[in-house]
Image (cartoon, coloured by chain):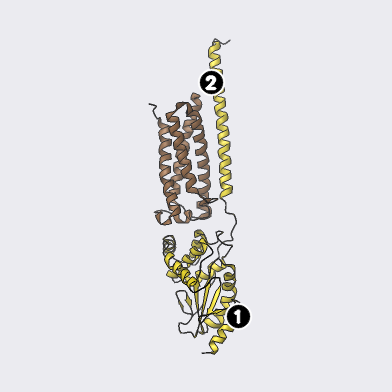
Amino acid sequence: MNRLIGWQVASLGCAVAGIVVSGYLNAAHWDRRALVCGVGDCHAVQSSRYAEVNGIPVALLGLGMYAVVVVLGLLRWRYPAWRANATILAFAISLAGVLYVAYLTYLEVFVIEAICQWCVVSALLTVGLLGAEGEGVRVVLRSGT
Amino acid sequence: MSSRSPRVRRQRAVARAARRRMVWRLGSAVVVALAVVAVLIVAGRPENDLPAVEAARVDYGEIPTSGWTLGQPNAPVTVVAWADYQCPYCGVFARDVEPRLIAEYVATGRVRFEFRPLPFLGDESVQATEAAACALDQGQFWGFHETLFANQHGENEGAFSDERLRSMARQLRLDEHQFDQCLDGATHEAEVGTMRDEARRQGITSTPTLAVNGTIVPSWDYATLKQAIDAALAVR
């Protein structure tokens, strides 16, 4: 049986936690009463004009990103020959995630003028994901496989 | 001079080529990732840049208000207006006709003006009406009502998004927390639905529709409305 190493565990951990958070935000997108917000104003963010991209909830994009990274993580664990390509792909996806999350955070702070605590948690998980996958890319490039 | 064997050199060359391919793939993946982010940002920008929300200045002086009604409760004439907050002609009525009606008849105690929402133009009509009911909970219905009509912008294009409704509440100095809870909890969903159903039961099929003492006025322009009110006052 193949063993998961540190950065792979970190990546899977962040991605699974991200699925939980973005899954909750998706549920709250359809039923605003489900949204519980202790700090900030999640409602203002979730109901803003920026909460959807062409009718697709941003939270659903996040859910898709985390789900794909989990699938890639499991694939490279199960099939070591796919490790390099899966890691490069997961790195690129999490890089896109971090850049997009940076843009969304800018919107929250300067345009919507409200912070959504769950979005902040998701943003931190995306940064964690990029950190883990960055380490993965470093390992893959060094080993050449 | 190198002491490495041709086999080792070949292995290293193969490894270097594999690494180059990997770097190439990594670079390509990063470029695609950047392109995807750019597309998401462009696609996610609202289609229209709406003007900033501006609260209407409302000063009805000593005119009594009660719920969706403005004016003396015992006024001899009652004018009812059925309207949708997104309907453009309702906006014209609210901005041009309503102030004249209030100044000439409501403020003088001769007319009691009642607003009855008929939100039928889509989600934002319903949401705006529920928001107005939330403002009513805080005794600020009329200010919110005028602000909604002052900020009309197309139909279901974001003019009455929750974000902008909150901005209206903020500008009117409503208790934001209470307003948010009311709006998010859809506190007045059933009430607004009942009002809409009631209007339909009464045969109201278009907005704005006006009635003077229960009789539908053929047009909503001020001259026609004034004529109907004066006729109703004359028979008193």
The label on residue A122 is: none
Q: Residues within 10 Å of mark 2 (few under 14, many from 20)?
A: some
Residue A103 placement (x, y as % from top left): 53, 47
In this rendering, the answer to whether B205 lies above or below A30 is below
Give the Cα distance between marks 2 and 1: 89 Å
Q: Is residue A13 above or below residue A34?
A: above
Callout 1: residue from which chain? B
Instruction: Using the image, determine if residue A62 lies above or below residue A75.
Output: below
Residue B190 is situated, as x and y percent measured from the top left of the image, at 42, 66
Tell me whether the residue at label 2 lies in contact with that at label 1, contact meaning CB atoms closer than 8 angstroms.
no
The shade of chain B is yellow
Q: Which residue is mark 1?
A: B224
Q: Quadrant of the N terminus of chain A?
A: top left
Q: Nearer the viewer, residue B29 or A56?
A: A56
Considering every residue shown, the one lying at the far left of the view is A1
Q: Tag 1 or tag 2, which sits nearer the N-term?
A: 2
Residue nearest the observer in this picture, A19 or A132 = A19
- Residue A131 vs B196, above or below: the answer is above
- On whether disc 2 and disc 1 are found on a single subunit, the reply is yes
Pinpoint residue A73: horizontal percent, then vertical percent.
44, 34
Residue drawn at (53%, 13%) of the image = B8
Badge number at residue B15: 2
Chain with brown colouring: A
Q: Amino acid at mark 2?
A: Ala
